Amino acid sequence: MSGNAGVWIDHRKAIIIILSTSGERITQINSDVEKHVRSSGGSQSRSTNGAQSSSAEDVIEHRFANHLEVYYKKVIETLKDAEHILVMGPGEARIELQKQFHDKKTHARIAENEKCDKMTDPQIAARIREFFHTTAVG
């Protein structure tokens, strides 16, 4: 493919726009992950020596992390042929995705990691077009 791409991502979905000479392609990937809620306290079991044992919260946290890893792999697979990538999103997911790119030795392709609020698909596409039109990458 060898074009530029952008992704708006949070923990629930990724909107991927791939720009090429033949036009734009929009792909949505849903994580299907349940909302991640961290407990602020509550009862936790302790072993006889007072150390905290593995709790249900630890299991939930581990499951959430594994689910996100699979989700990020799907996003990276969709973006694998892009030359340069604009990563956007409101929270941690955009940073976590960039780390996944780095871990896979593909971080050089990320042109920018931009914090932004929720956007419609047309707004995402417009921002990506504008970014690559006004930014010299490569």
Image (cartoon, rainbow, N blue to C red):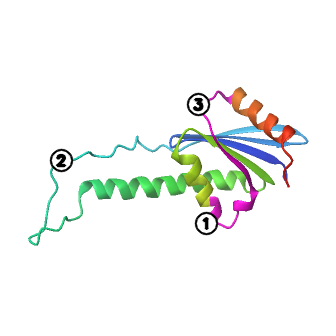
Tag 3, which secondary structure? loop
Q: Amino acid at mark 2?
A: Gly
* Separation of residues labelled 1 and 2 (CA atoms): 35 Å
Residue that carries the numbered disc 1 in the rendered image = 103
- Answer with left or right where residue 29 lies relative to residue 50: right
* Residue at x 68% of width, y 67% of height: 105
Magenta span contains residue 4: no
* Separation of residues labelled 3 and 2 (CA atoms): 33 Å
Q: Amino acid at mark 1?
A: Asp
Q: Which residues are magenta?
A: 101-121
Look at the image and tell me in which quarter the C terminus lies.
bottom right
Tag 1, which secondary structure? helix
Q: Nearer the viewer, residue 111 or 9?
A: 111
* Residue at x 58% of width, y 30% of height: 118
Name the image quarter holding residue 34: top left
**Which residue is farthest right?**
21
Tag 2, which secondary structure? loop
Place of residue 116 in the rendered image (x, y in percent of width and height, measured from the top left): 61, 35
Magenta span contains residue 108: yes
Assess disc 1: are there few (<14), some (14-19) or many (≥20) residues with their C-alpha within 10 Å of its C-alpha. few
Upstream in the sequence, badge 1 or badge 2?
2
* Separation of residues labelled 1 and 3 (CA atoms): 27 Å
* Residue at x 51% of width, y 43% of height: 11
Residue that carries the numbered disc 3 in the rendered image = 118
Q: Nearer the viewer, residue 114 or 24?
A: 114
Upstream in the sequence, badge 3 or badge 2?
2
Which label belongs to residue 21? none
